[in-house]
Amino acid sequence: MIFAAAAVLTPPDPVTQIGLAIPLLILYELSIFSVNIIEKKAEQKNA
């Protein structure tokens, strides 16, 4: 879905589309990891 969004938001140039999709993918993965870490800390605090 990230690559589809990049295709819609950028001009029809594959380099630009990939240039937008890669940072979006990295930010998405970082948000998943950060939520996982926060949940583990909250779980340890409540235990």
Image (spheres, rainbow, N blue to C red):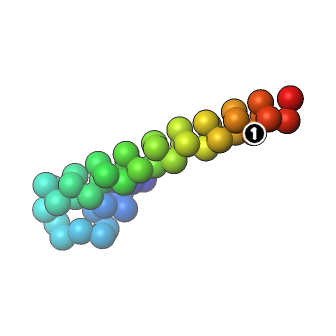
Q: In screen coordinates, is 12 left or right of 32?
A: left
At 61% across and 44% down in the image, what residue appears? 35
Quarter placement of the C terminus: top right
Q: Position of residue 29 (x, y in %)?
A: 45, 42
Q: In screen coordinates, is 39 left or right of 43?
A: left
**24 above or below 12?**
above
Q: Position of residue 16 (x, y in %)?
A: 17, 60
**11 above or below 13?**
below
Q: In screen coordinates, is 22 left or right of 44?
A: left
At 69% across and 33% down in the image, what residue appears? 40
Mark 1 neighbour class, 10 Å CA radius: few under 14, some 14 to 19, many 20 or more: few
**31 above or below 6?**
above
Task: Decide which of 21, 44 is in the foreground and name it.
Answer: 44
In terms of secondary structure, where does tag 1 sit?
helix
At 53% across and 38% down in the image, what residue appears? 33
Type of residue at label 1? Ala
Q: Position of residue 9 (x, y in %)?
A: 30, 70
Q: In screen coordinates, is 14 left or right of 47?
A: left
At 46% across and 49% down in the image, what residue appears? 28
**Residue designated by label 1:** 42
For residue 32, which quarter of the picture?
top right
Task: Decide which of 42, 18 is in the foreground and name it.
Answer: 42
For residue 37, which quarter of the picture?
top right
